[in-house]
Amino acid sequence: MRVRRKIINRFVGMGAKFLRLRNFHSMFGVVAGLKTPAVLRLKQTWGEVSPGIIQQLEDMHALMNPDNNFAAYRAAYAEALQPRIPFMGVVLYDLFKIEQAYNDTILAKMGQGLVDWTSRDEIASKVLETLVNDQNECNYRLKDWSDPVTIKILFFGGDSA
Amino acid sequence: MLQALNKFLEGAVTQESKMIAQNLQRTQQMYAKTDRYIANEKWSQNAGQSIYKQLKVIGAPIFQGIADVFDARRAAINITYADSIVFKALNLEEFANQKWLRPNAATSAPILTELRAQTNRMACFVAKTILLVDLKQLNN
């Protein structure tokens, strides 16, 4: 249990570092892993984790809250300076919803001038424009390559069991 | 593997090839046995038994050593660098016509698929490491 607590502390620290690096994509992965039901059920272990660490985790988890169309995440993302990596899940969610909103009926009405909305492509372009800006500014530096955790996640963590 | 990841790996190898090779070997050995067990879906075949008993039977490696080698800050910096390379390689065409939702997403939107898989890998790694970390202690 002591080792497990230590590992939880490290993963929370890793998530916090992702947040400081403004890598929202991987931060969501770490928090999702820590909030897995199987991990959450470890009551005794969580009981030994310090309140500061738990608070840190909760702060990160709050960013993942889907309420108000991911308002917490969007606010944090808007404030984040470059370089930054967005959580792709939200980008895809936006594009999916845009596609859903502009169904064939709406598009037909738009074609007849009955609906005066910004076109689907224009809205989608705005989402992707932000993404391209982020891509252009995304200049992170490498620390080193001798880290087994990095190697494990990137090259041997392919299973999704 | 994706072109971006290949470049990424090549870059790594040119830097400290010997050290990386050693680490790759060690890490692979450390995880391979458990991964094989999970991949073979033997967990579901022996569903009646607890996960700890099952892993004890096959003599799966225990992840205790990871607490000593796991530098959260370093890992986060490295993974962010890796993410940035894949993210920059993302082509906007992959977003067209919801390609990422199609059955052939791996070929029509490969980098987007890789980015999505990366989050899943990370979550899986975190949960698996925590759950299996002190297995030996629990068994004893």
Image: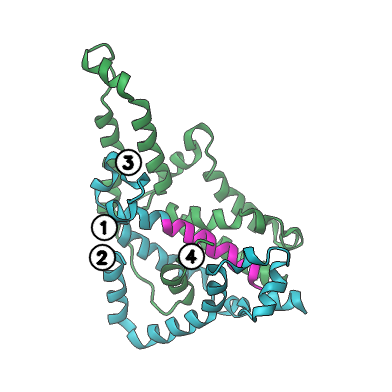
Residue A84 image point, x, y percent: 36, 52
Whether residue B131 appears in magenta in the rendering, the answer is yes
Q: Which-is-in-front pick, marks 3 and 2?
A: 3
Screen quadrant of the N terminus of chain A: bottom right
> The residue under label 1 is which amino acid type?
Ala
Q: Residue furthest front?
A: B45
Marks 3/2 same chain? yes
Instruction: Confirm or deny contact between disc 1 and disc 2 (CB under 8 A).
Output: yes
Name the residue tied to disc 3.
B98
The Cα atoms of the two marked residues, 1 and 4, are separated by 23 Å
Q: CA distance from mark 1 to mark 2?
A: 9 Å
- Chain assigned cyan: B
**Label drawn at residue B89:** 1
Residue B37 left/right relative to A84: right
Q: Is residue A117 above or below residue A57?
A: above
Cα–Cα gap, marks 4 and 2: 20 Å
Q: Which residues are magenta?
A: B117-133
Q: Secondary structure at mark 3?
A: helix
A69 and B51: which is toward the camera: B51
Task: Give the residue pinned by disc 2.
Answer: B3
Where in the figure is residue A154, as x and y percent of width and height? Answer: 42, 68
Q: Chain of mark 2?
A: B
- Residue at 44 percent across and 52 percent down: it is A24
* Circle nearer the N terminus (1, 2): 2
Q: Is residue B8 magenta?
A: no
- Quarter location, residue A119: top left
Question: Which chain is in green here?
Answer: A
Mark 3 / mark 2, whichever is N-terminal: 2
Residue A31: image location, x then y, percent: 55, 54
Helix, strand or loop at mark 4 = loop
Is disc 4 surrounded by few (<14), some (14 to 19) or many (20+) residues within 10 Å? some
